[in-house]
Amino acid sequence: MPAESPIGAGGAVPSPWRFCVAPMLDWTDRHCRMFHRQLSCHARLYTEMVTTGALLHGDVSRHLDFDPREHPVALQLGGSEPDELAQCARLGARWGYAEINLNCGCPSERVQRGAFGACLMAEPALVADCVKAMLDVASVPITVKHRIGLGKAEGYGFVRDFVGALHDAGCRVFIVHARNAWLQGLSPKKNREVPPLRYAVAAQLRRDFPQATIVLNGGVDTLDAAKAALSSFEGVMLGRAAYHTPWLLARVDAEVFNGDSPRPREAVIAAMTSYLHERAAAGVAVRSVTRHMLGLVQGERGARQWRRQLSDPQFLAAHGADALLAAARSVQWPAAA
């Protein structure tokens, strides 16, 4: 089935991947996703990467439990063994995730030692087998997040053949981080900054695979940039910009999906306070929730005090599950908020 047209193109229904928040290790846990969901009803959210070993030999519920209010939410897996990935995809689908995403883009040394992440791009036949194995057992979409090349070689044929092998295996959604992965000599942080962005490569993939959904990732750091990308791609994915400046997500429903206007920040704080009471009663540390919300009031008077208080263990201990309400007293809200 051809990828759906952007919203507004003949009244077509938007792709489920029209606006996504990237999987980010140590950041996009269930508490972060619940916060982001208060800001946007429609953005597609992703878990942190979960390795097959962690699921098959660890505490499954700790890794997979999530709140139904987070939907739509996708599970990102890290692994390279088809049988193991199939087992984990089956688990993820049973747990209720809307999508299983395979990580073929992470360049970290730890991931390379596990023989997965970006280094898998050098083995398209293996990745195709992984995709087939997951498709055979899961009823939800199987998607792949990947780079556009390895090292400093910039030939288009490498990524074209990689996507082609996966497309032949049945994958129809590709989240394309439009940079190469330099597997030697760069940290993961530098791998998000130093290899040049080449959006033209992602655009060529869209032309060469018209039946696939191509989601652009990499270097998109404002909502305006995201909307501009949607004139060329079925979807866009933001990462650190969405985490550090989360209020941009509040405009997504209205400006990307023609939906509701943003909720006031005070309403978001009230909703997250209710959630914090739920989680604190279940034994979750207050900071596990509040740490994701430090950027909520960026740009408002009192934002520095908000960040300082929510980072202060003594403040959190004193106010407990009402810490957000207490910190909000230091913020001077604009009259229209």
Image (spheres, rainbow, N blue to C red):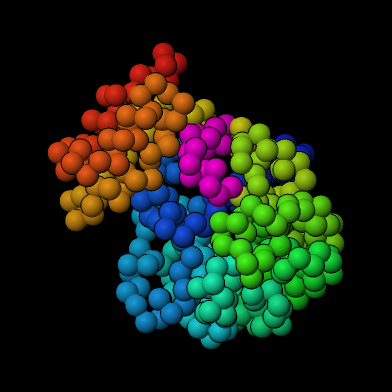
Residue under the image location 84 percent in, 66 percent down:
155
Residue 242 magenta-drawn? yes
Q: Position of residue 130 (x, y in %)?
A: 61, 80
Total tally of numbered discs in the picture:
0
Residue under the image location 35 percent in, 24 percent down:
302
- Asked if one can make out residue 118 in the rendered structure from this viewpoint, the answer is yes
Residue 107 magenta-drawn? no
Left or right: 216 in relation to 331? right
Which region of the structure is painted magenta?
238-254
Left or right: 149 in relation to 249? right
Residue under the image location 52 percent in, 43 percent down:
242
Q: Residue furthest top?
A: 335
Q: Is residue 315 above or below residue 111?
A: above
Q: Position of residue 220 (x, y in %)?
A: 65, 44
Q: In which quarter of the view is residue 331 placed?
A: top left
Q: Is residue 95 above or below residue 129?
A: above
- Of 150 and 233, which appears nearest the observer? 150
Q: Can you say which quadrant of the picture contains the C terminus?
A: top left
Q: Can you say which quadrant of the picture contains the N terminus?
A: bottom right
- Of 13 and 271, which appears nearest the observer? 271
- Asked if one can make out residue 263 in the rendered structure from this viewpoint, the answer is no
Q: In which quarter of the view is residue 26 placed?
A: bottom left
Q: Position of residue 13 (x, y in %)?
A: 67, 45
Residue under the image location 37 percent in, 82 percent down:
57
- Of 144 and 192, which appears nearest the observer? 192
Predominant secondary structure in magenta? helix
Q: Residue furthest front?
A: 185
Q: Position of residue 101 (x, y in %)?
A: 56, 66
- Of 78 and 84, which appears nearest the observer? 78
